[in-house]
Amino acid sequence: METTGTPDTAVPGIADAAVPVGVERLIDVPGLRNLRDAGGFATADGGRVREGLLFRSGSLGDLGPEGARQLAGLDLNTVVDLRSEPELVHWPDQRHGLSYTAVSLPTLPPFEDTASGDPNAAADQADRGLDPAEPGAADPGLRQMYVFMAEVAGPPIAAFVRRLLEPGALPALVHCAVGKDRTGITVAVLLSALGVAEADITDDYLVSNAGLGLLGEPVHYLDENGVDRISRPVHPELLTLFLERTVGHHGSAEAFLRHHGVTDAELRRLRELLTRPV
């Protein structure tokens, strides 16, 4: 496996200022979008998040034999899928001989008048009748979606944390449809609980725009019903909005996870497993 090229060669035609910090961390695996290691970040206690234990990406629905062969190099024991049941039915992950435990932890319920829990589909509908976003800002519908995720995503995020603590669960991969919204908030809470600075968490979150080719115009795609949808870029304000309504409301990521049932002993074990002294 290889990481993507340097920003000026990986995304020609895009101004350097638009290229997210950390784009070189993207791992190129055929058929798997937006793959990268969630480790390597400094923590507040002077440690560092271990690399090679937790990865994030889009779904494995387009993974082919060659991609699976390369992905095998990560030695994954667990793949956590944050998508809704309708998404899993229409776009099942492809294994091609990969051996891992598949875990379904839907972040969101299916939305009214949509067939899945896809934030982009819901945002399309939420945008109707709303004022346009400021230039360069997130779409109003997507902002509304992040407010909704702050209300409902606590239990599955807590369940995700607990799953990582299961014997033999690591290395693990967590993904949703494209690995930017549901995966973004899940990894953000985890990194915050490990003591990673919000600036580094935001930088990692924004790498998805490069990983998905969203540094320019939004990308159109067909959902499971053949409806044209828009995959929107992520913006710092979206993550800030989510964290203010979850981590900020409870005082810390640890307190947010405790509120949803994660124990102090589990939080200590999480830090033991996923961080190391420098």
Image: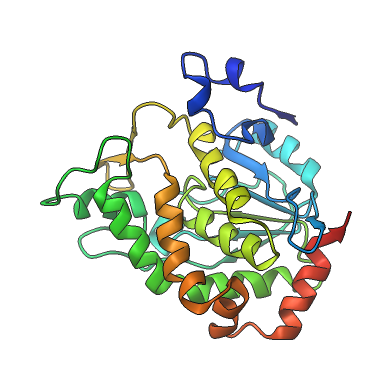
User: Which residue is painted at 30% across and 39% down in the image?
Assistant: 230
> Does residue 50 appear in this view?
yes
Q: Position of residue 262 (x, y in %)?
A: 63, 82
User: Which residue is painted at 42% across and 44% down in the image?
Assistant: 235
User: Which residue is painted at 66% across and 42% down in the image?
Assistant: 36
> Does residue 90 appear in this view?
no
Q: Position of residue 128 (x, y in %)?
A: 14, 50
User: Which residue is painted at 44% across and 66% down in the image?
Assistant: 244
Q: In the rendered picture of this protein, how many numbered marks are placed on residues?
A: 0
Q: Position of residue 5 (x, y in %)?
A: 66, 21
Q: In which quarter of the image is the N terminus?
A: top right
Between residue 107 and residue 154, name the one nearer to us.
154
When asked about the image quadrant of residue 4, the answer is top right
The answer to whether residue 28 is above or below residue 186 is above
Q: Hey, which residue is sitting farthest right in the picture?
A: 278
The answer to whether residue 167 is above or below residue 185 is below
The answer to whether residue 222 is above or below residue 263 is above
Q: Left or right: where does residue 218 sit relative to residue 28? A: left
Q: Left or right: where does residue 41 sit relative to residue 155? A: right
Q: Where is residue 84 in the image (x, y as percent from the top left)?
A: 42, 62
Q: Left or right: where does residue 214 sit relative to residue 206? A: left
Q: Quadrant of the C terminus?
A: bottom right
Q: Which colour scheme is used?
A: rainbow
When asked about the image quadrant of residue 67, the answer is top right
The answer to whether residue 36 is above or below residue 90 is above
Q: Hey, which residue is sitting farthest left in the picture?
A: 129
Between residue 53 and residue 227, name the one nearer to us.
53
